[in-house]
Amino acid sequence: MSDVKLPEELRYTKSHEWVRLEGDLVVIGITDHAQQELTDIVFVDLPKVGANVAEGKPALVLESVKTVADVYAPVAGTVAEVNGELAKHPELINQDPYGRGWIYRLRPSGPVALDRFLDAAGYRTHVLGAAH
């Protein structure tokens, strides 16, 4: 876990998504730890713009050479935008999970309290605790 990047300004879920507020939208992707565990991502089944997602429920599916994994919605809302680059270049999630590898933007259905998510230190503890 020492070589895993965890930007301090982001918030994290126990199911390995990261969350960032941008104006009235929430940007969501998967953590560096998650992409390392999945290995080479080969396909992203992006949600449809306008789709409603429920908090804690699968919002989309990632396929890697190793497995298929759900990506969960950290908050309820409506998909406002998806990262269309991932359709042709799913490897961006492996190469730059916090930058060009973002997955979708969500318009939350209510206020978002970032303090209910893990900070970088809390996520690091969660992952290290789960590894032992």
Image (cartoon, grey):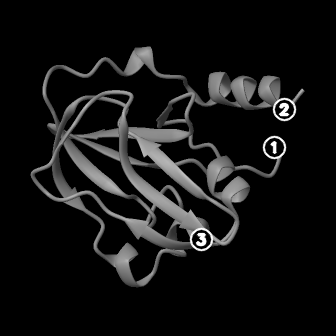
Note whether 36 is above or below 5 in the view shown. Answer: below
Task: Measure how far apart labels 1 and 3 are at the Cα level.
Answer: 17 Å
Which residue in the structure is indicated by mark 3?
95
Q: Position of residue 85 (x, y in %)?
A: 34, 77
Task: Measure how far apart labels 3 and 2 are at the Cα level.
Answer: 23 Å
Mark 1 crowdedness (10 Å alpha carbons): few <14, some 14-19, many ≥20 = few
Q: Considering only order in the chain, which callout, 2 or 3, is on the residue closer to the N terminus?
A: 3
Which residue in the structure is indicated by mark 1?
1
Q: Residue at x 48, y 74 (%)?
A: 90
Note whether 94 is above or below 76 in the view shown. Answer: below
Mark 2 crowdedness (10 Å alpha carbons): few <14, some 14-19, many ≥20 = few
Which residue in the structure is indicated by mark 2?
131
Which structural element holds mark 3? helix
User: Which residue reaches farthest front?
Assistant: 68
Task: Measure how far apart labels 2 and 1 are at the Cα level.
Answer: 10 Å
Q: Position of residue 88 (x, y in %)?
A: 39, 84
Q: Is residue 128 left or right of residue 56?
A: right
Q: Residue at x 14, y 48 (%)?
A: 51
Q: Considering only order in the chain, which callout, 1 or 2, is on the residue closer to the N terminus?
A: 1
**Mark 3 is on which residue type?**
Gln
Residue 46 bears which disc, if any?
A: none
